[in-house]
Amino acid sequence: MTDVAVSSLPPVVYDPFDYSLHDDPYPTYRRLRDEAPVFHNEKFGFYALSRYEDCSAAVRDFKTFSSASGTSLEDLKAQVQLLINTDPPVHSKMRHLIAGMFTPAKVAPLEDAVRTMARELLAPHLASGRIDIIADFAAKLPMAIICRLLGFPREDEDRLRHLTDTVVHRDEGVFGMPDEGMHATLALYEYFNADIAERARGARREDIIALLMDAQADGRLTHEELIGYIYILSIAGNETTTKLIGNMCYQLHSHPDQAALLRDNPALIESAVEETMRFDGPTQMMARTTTRDVTLHGVTIPANSKVALLFTSANRDERKFDRAEDYDIRRNPRDHLGFGGGLHACLGAALARLEARVAIEEILAALGDFSVDESSLERMHSPQVRGLTREILTFTPSG
Ligand code: HEM
């Protein structure tokens, strides 16, 4: 017996490479949870889990749901070792090296820098009453902070952002990283290699890369792991945080009651960030590979299968969250899967939360009662990341 509902609609299909899914994947996710909680995509040969309980259990069971063959649906092509694509004991060794640099206490001192940068980015647009909150703000802020953490010069930010964006972009219907993505990956490796070589020649700088280089120097990290670490920090903290800020502006615009509630109760900001992560988080899904046959809801997933864990579907699972399809900034759902869970739970979550909170605080303070120009919206197309690439906010000009 399975506990799935029967629908009179054609069978539900989940194809994350189909652009038409990206505008609003949530009705599909709902049908997957109800009708096909273990969905098999025959075209690409992967499975998908969409319920909270199943995704949450899978991220905690690395022995069955391994990350070592990659965490996207595509075959692993990376030539470097990425923390995100490891299982213990390699994962434990790598994560331990710098986990202490990303605790809430360690990132808290960055708040002033984030706030200053947010104000600098908003200021030139206040007199016009319009800003593309993605291109002019949300795309710049996280990259500037991660460059600062990694010690990369400000003048390299635009180039690095372009390269990391190219790595995550996917052409419609294309399974696998296009050539531009591979070229961008190689260009990033080259940049990181040059940076390390330069550091090795000069005086020591006290930052994350210095800690990772120490680990390489005494044999705890290989050169490939070192490059991979810098690569994942550059990629993971960039696009996702940009999209969270954009998604949050959009949700506040779409839910004026919630925006008013936040304006009247600024102390709700942290809860509002968390609710946005739950309701419309940027990381839609991460993949795993089964190490053995697994039977769930009457379906057997064979060993060595790719399995998509649909985190944002899990986050709207009404079996877990009351009124799951309602955006309610008072909810403060700390157990959502927007940052994943288990061993691989997002290393940069405290930083992302800080950046998003300060960004929205500054947007509300500077722009007041803004609206989103719906005709301006352009969406990113990626099987894993959901968010806007263009989003014009309009507001009463100041000055
Ligand atoms: C892992 C989401 C921001 C660094 C993850 C995972 C998710 C996630 C879902 C789990 C991956 C998995 O289970 O396979 C997000 C979102 C962000 C964000 C939605 C912004 C809103 C950041 C930032 C950084 C970062 C700012 C770093 C500065 C990482 C790293 C991992 C990770 C290094 C891998 C951890 C591991 O494998 O142990 N992130 N992330 N992320 N994230 Fe984030």
Image (cartoon, helix red, strand yellow):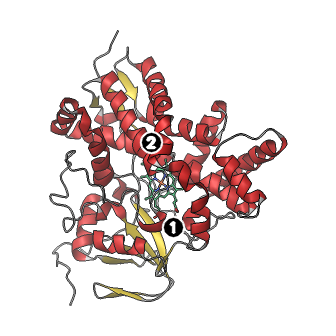
**Looking at the image, residue 343 lies above or below residue 42:** above
Which image quarter holds the C terminus? top left
Please provide percent x and percent y for residue 218.
77, 60
Question: Which residue, as the protein is rendered here, is positioned at the far top?
Answer: 399
Q: Amino acid at mark 1?
A: Thr
Q: Residues within 10 Å of mark 2 (few under 14, many from 20)?
A: many
Residue that carries the numbered disc 2 in the rendered image? 242
Query: Is residue 267 visible to us here?
Result: yes
Left or right side of 258 for 77: right
Residue that carries the numbered disc 1 in the rendered image? 71
* Count of marks, rendered view: 2
Residue 244 image-quadrant placement: top left
**Looking at the image, residue 174 lies above or below residue 390:** below
Q: Amino acid at mark 2?
A: Thr
Left or right side of 193 for 137: left
Residue sitting at x 44%, y 62%? 17
